[in-house]
Image (cartoon, helix red, strand yellow):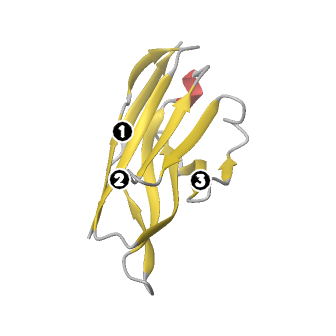
Amino acid sequence: QVQLVESGGGLVQAGGSLRLSCAASGTIFSINTMGWYRQAPGKQRELVATITSSGDTNYADSVKGRFTISIDNAKKMVYVQMNSLKPEDTAVYYCNANVRTTSAVSRPYWGQGTQVTVSS
């Protein structure tokens, strides 16, 4: 089994910053990609940013220029630095990882989520 544990959420004023962290543990052969998704009340879960083990990144248009995703392959951790936060960034943020548990099997895993609230 694979576990993803997020940390770093909280309450911040508009214009402020937060850094989310996610640690992967368990039976991990390798990690293909890691990323962050978010879900605001009454809305569908949406992509925030993803990063491959080689460092290729992908961002939602709404966060480009404000958020930066990074990965530490040795520690099996992914981070997202969130700057210039806006009230519309308020959501539960979920860590996602596409993990290879054996040389032939890979699947996505999700963390439990961490709340980010941005006050105006």
Residue 37 visible from this viewpoint: no
Q: Position of residue 94 (x, y in %)?
A: 43, 48
Give the Cα distance between marks 3 and 2.
16 Å
Furthest-bottom residue in this view: 104
What is the secondary structure assignment of the residue under circle 2?
loop
> Please, what secondary structure does the residue beneath circle 3 have?
strand
Pick the residue in front: 33 or 47.
Answer: 33
In the figure, residue 9 lies in which quadrant? Answer: top left
- Give the residue type that dot 1 points to: Thr
Which residue appears at 36% of the width and 38% of the height? 114
On screen, residue 89 above or below 100: above
Q: Is residue 25 above or below residue 7?
A: below
Q: x, y percentage for residue 7?
A: 33, 37
Q: Residues within 10 Å of mark 3 (few under 14, many from 20)?
A: many
Q: Residue at x 55, y 59 (%)?
A: 53
> What kind of element bears circle 1?
strand
Q: Which residue is mark 3?
A: 51
**Can you give x and y, in whole percent of width and height, for residue 83 in the image?**
59, 23
Residue at the outermost front position? 74
